[in-house]
Amino acid sequence: MKLKLTILILSLTAIVISCDKVKNPIENPTVGNSNSTVNPYTFYSKNNITKCNFKKVLLEDYTGQQCGNCPPAAVVAHNIGDQYKDTVIAIAVHAGFFSKTNSTFPTSYTTTVGNDWDASSGFGVSSAGNPNGMINRKDYGSGKIKPQGAWQGYVELAKKEIQKVKLELFLNYDGGTRQLSAMAKVKFKATHPNNTKINLVLMEDSIIGPQKDYLQLPDVVPNYVFMHMLRGSLNGSWGVTAKNTPIAVNDSMSVSYDNYAIPSNFKDKDMYLVAFVYDELDKTILQVEKLKIK
């Protein structure tokens, strides 16, 4: 069975703002945290880049294949992503008790990065019970962790916040060697009081496997379709430094990672690179962007 969209389409109509597609950029940034020896914009110029001048939102859905209440939350995340198109980016993080494997659920979808985010030293989302999630990792009151029924409202709040960071994402992918090279360019549109970091992660759509779903009978769906699943990180669980204080208007930097090997069991045609800049002190996401790798 394919993922069933059993929840009614959300009633609020989104105002969709499109992004400019830019080819052959001619700027020459200062590149940090890279082993690249080529001019970065020459290297990436054959790919389109997404260049957006509005605030985007990261929605993290913490889940697991043994969580029978999680499929409806996946539908909520999917519908919000569809509603807001380019402006809301959803990631499904498999972590915690319900992501364990057994004879019925033999495949693990956990990742080092997802486990680190979910740990008690991270956000501890699964400890609060799945399904739960976060919107831009921000505490809007009563903590960062929010149930699926609250995601829509907090997405609306997040979209109204001032965009403090402009984020451009570039990539170059060789389908033959399955080598991915990526670069993110950051420019601050406002001052910021704390140090900032940037994380580059991968997610994949349309992964087929068994999932417990209490809305179905029997309650194990053998061919469930997992969407926007976190698959790994290019630069560690918590990324690298973007810019330390003092941070002034128009401060900029770039970070890159060369020759990341996409595992052979991942479907590269269904994969995305996701980059986000966040406040190192409170972990709040300042901007997020994604780009299909193939």
Image (cartoon, rainbow, N blue to C red):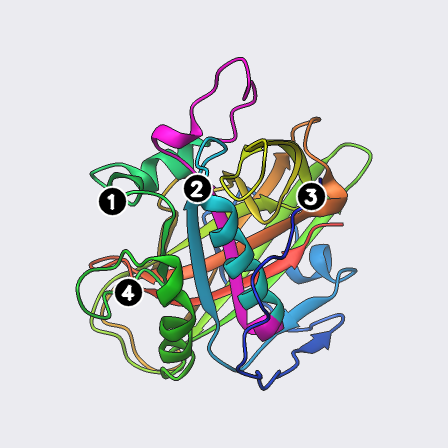
Marks 4 and 3 close (CB-CB < 8 Å): no
Query: What kind of residue is marked 4?
Result: Lys
The picture places residue 127, in percent across and down from the top left corner, at 25, 39
- Neighbours of disc 3 within 10 Å: few (<14), some (14-19), many (20+): some
Marks 4 and 1 close (CB-CB < 8 Å): no
Range covered by the magenta-colored residues: 83-109
- Neighbours of disc 1 within 10 Å: few (<14), some (14-19), many (20+): few
Dot 4 or dot 3, earlier in sequence:
4
Dot 4 or dot 1, earlier in sequence:
1
Query: Residue at the spot x=49%, y=47% of the render?
Result: 92
Query: Residue at the spot x=36%, y=79% of the render?
Result: 157
Q: Secondary structure at mark 4?
A: loop
Q: Secondary structure at mark 3?
A: loop
Q: Secondary structure at mark 1?
A: helix
Which is nearer the eye, 247 or 66? Answer: 66
Q: CA distance from mark 2 to mark 3?
A: 16 Å
Q: Is residue 29 visible?
A: no
Vertical arrangement, residue 37 with respect to residue 10, above or below: above
Residue located beneath label 2 in the image = 63
Q: CA distance from mark 1 to mark 3?
A: 27 Å
